[in-house]
Image (spheres, helix red, strand yellow):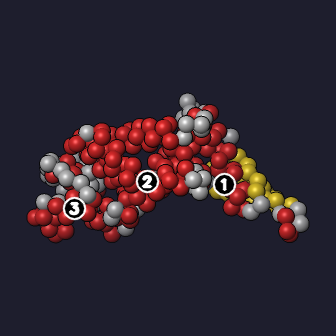
Amino acid sequence: MLLYLIRKMNDWDDCQSSLGVSFSQKSLLEQAFVHRSYLNENPTFALSSNERLEFLGDAILNFIVAERLYKEFADLPEGALTEIRASLVCRDTLADLASSLKLGDWLLLGQGEETSGGRSKPSNLANAMEALIGALYLEQGLARARRFILKQLKPRLEKTKAGRITPNYKALLQELIQGQQRPAPVYRLVEATGPDHNRQFTVEILVEGEALARGTGKSKKAAESQAARAAWERSRCNHGQTRLQA
C-alpha cells in the first residue's frame, strides 16, 4: 500500500517517462496495472482491474502484427503467417517485452500475489502488456498503439525477416493447453536409433496420458520441437473443437 501511495503522489509520471508514453487520463494508465488480487483486498478502490483492457489490447495486438506480417512477408502463405504471428504474440514473448519495460514494477497486487512473486509471473506481465496496449489505444488511437507495438517488436521482426528466428512451438503448445485448463504436456522419448554420430530421436507428447503427436530429430530438443509443432498445427485444424485432440 505504501508503494501505491508513493506512486499516486508521483501521479505516474515516472511510469510514463520510463515507457515513453504520455496519458492525459492518468487513471487509464493506472488501470492497466491493476491486478484482480489488489481489488480483492481493496474493494473500495476507484478503478476496476486491467482485464477488460487486456481483452482489448489482445485484439489490437493481433491485428497490428497481422497487418505488418501481411505487408512484410508478401510471399508467405497463410499458414506460415499464422505461425509467425502466434509466436510474436504468445505469452512468453509478451512477458519478455514487459520484463524489458519493467512493467512488473508498476503492478498493483494483493499481498498474497506480491509475496508469491507476482511481479515476475509471465502471465501477469503478459496481461499488463496487453492492458497497456489497450489503454494506449483508448487514449491516443490506433496509430499511436501501432507505433508502440512495432517499436517493441522491431528486433524480433527483423530477426524473423532475416530467417534467424522461428516460432517457439513448445511455448505455443503449452499456452494452448493451459488455456484449456489442462496440465502441462509431457515429452516422452520413444526411441533413439542409428549410430552415435548420426542418432535419430523420436519423442511423443502426452497430456493427461493422451498421446497428441510425435516428432523426430537429430537431438531430443529437435524432436520435441517437431512434436510440438505437429500438435499445435493440428490444433488449428481442430480450432472449432473445445479441446486439442490426438
Q: From this viewpoint, is residue 183 visible? A: no
Q: What residue type is labelled 1?
A: Ser
Percent across and percent down for residue 56 are 33, 40
Say which residue appears at 33% left-offset and 50% top-offset.
Answer: 148
- In this picture, residue 229 sits left or right of residue 19: right
Q: What element carries label 3?
A: helix
Percent across and percent down for residue 69 are 49, 41
Query: Looking at the figure, which quarter contains the N terminus?
Result: bottom left
Say which residue appears at 64% left-offset and 56% top-offset.
Answer: 186
Percent across and percent down for residue 214 are 73, 49
Q: How many labels does the image show?
A: 3
Q: Among all residues in the image, which is located at the extreme left? A: 9
Task: Sort mark 2 into few (<14), some (14-19) or many (20+) by Cα contacts within 10 Å.
Answer: few
Q: Among all residues in the image, which is located at the extreme top? A: 240
Q: Please identify the quarter of the rendering in which residue 67 is found.
A: top left
Q: How far apart are labels 3 and 1 at the CA level?
A: 40 Å
Q: State which tag comes first along the sequence, 3 or 2.
A: 3
Q: Name the residue under label 3.
A: 17
Q: Nearer the viewer, residue 233 or 5?
A: 233
- In this picture, residue 186 sits left or right of residue 32: right
Q: Name the residue under label 2.
A: 154
Q: Is residue 105 above or below residue 129?
A: below
Q: Name the residue under label 1.
A: 225
Q: Please identify the quarter of the rendering in which residue 235 is found.
A: top right
